[in-house]
Image (cartoon, rainbow, N blue to C red):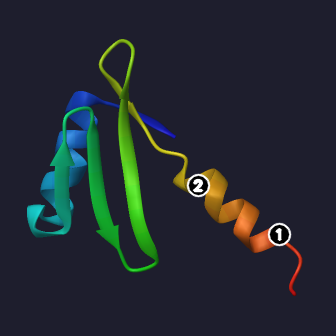
Amino acid sequence: MCLSAQALALFLNVIGLDMVTTDPGRVIVAAEAGEVHWVLTAGDVWCTMAPQLDRLARFSPLD
């Protein structure tokens, strides 16, 4: 999932900055299920793999 810088800023303002830490080129959101990392890509677009990782976790075999 990817967002423009403006859309990510709006999202972060909605959830509250107390759940957010930043590093150059990375924004980390402390969600209930774990941390979600947003990474800056080419063209000022921020992307996360969280939806794909969640889907993989749901369909992985139980041990």
Point out the residue furthest to the bottom here. 63
How far is the residue under mark 2 from the one under mark 1? 13 Å
* Image position of 25 with respect to 41: above or below: below
Numbered tag placed on residue 51 in the rendering: 2
Drawn side of residue 48 relative to residue 35, left or right: right
* Residue at (28, 40) in percent of width and height: 26
Residue 56: percent from the left, percent from the top? 74, 61
Whichever of callouts 2 and 1 sits on the residue coming sooner in the sequence is: 2
* Image position of 48 with respect to 41: above or below: below
* Residue at (71, 61) in percent of width and height: 55
Residue 27: percent from the left, percent from the top? 26, 47
Say what amino acid the circle numbered 2 marks: Pro
Dot 1, how many residues are within 10 Å of its Cα: few (below 14), some (14-19), or many (20+)? few
Which of the 4 quarters of the picture holds residue 61? Answer: bottom right
Dot 2, how many residues are within 10 Å of its Cα: few (below 14), some (14-19), or many (20+)? few
Q: Nearer the viewer, residue 46 or 4?
A: 46
Drawn side of residue 13 relative to residue 35, left or right: left
SS under mark 1: helix
Residue 13: percent from the left, percent from the top? 12, 54
* Image position of 36 with respect to 23: above or below: below
Drawn side of residue 20 relative to residue 1, left or right: left
* Image position of 3 with respect to 63: above or below: above
Quadrant of the drawing holding the C terminus: bottom right
Q: Nearer the viewer, residue 60 or 7?
A: 60
Say what amino acid the circle numbered 1 marks: Phe
Which of the 4 quarters of the picture holds residue 17? Answer: bottom left
Numbered tag placed on residue 34 in the rendering: none
Residue at the spot of label 1: 59
SS under mark 2: helix
* Residue at (47, 44) in percent of width and height: 48
* Residue at (82, 69) in percent of width and height: 59
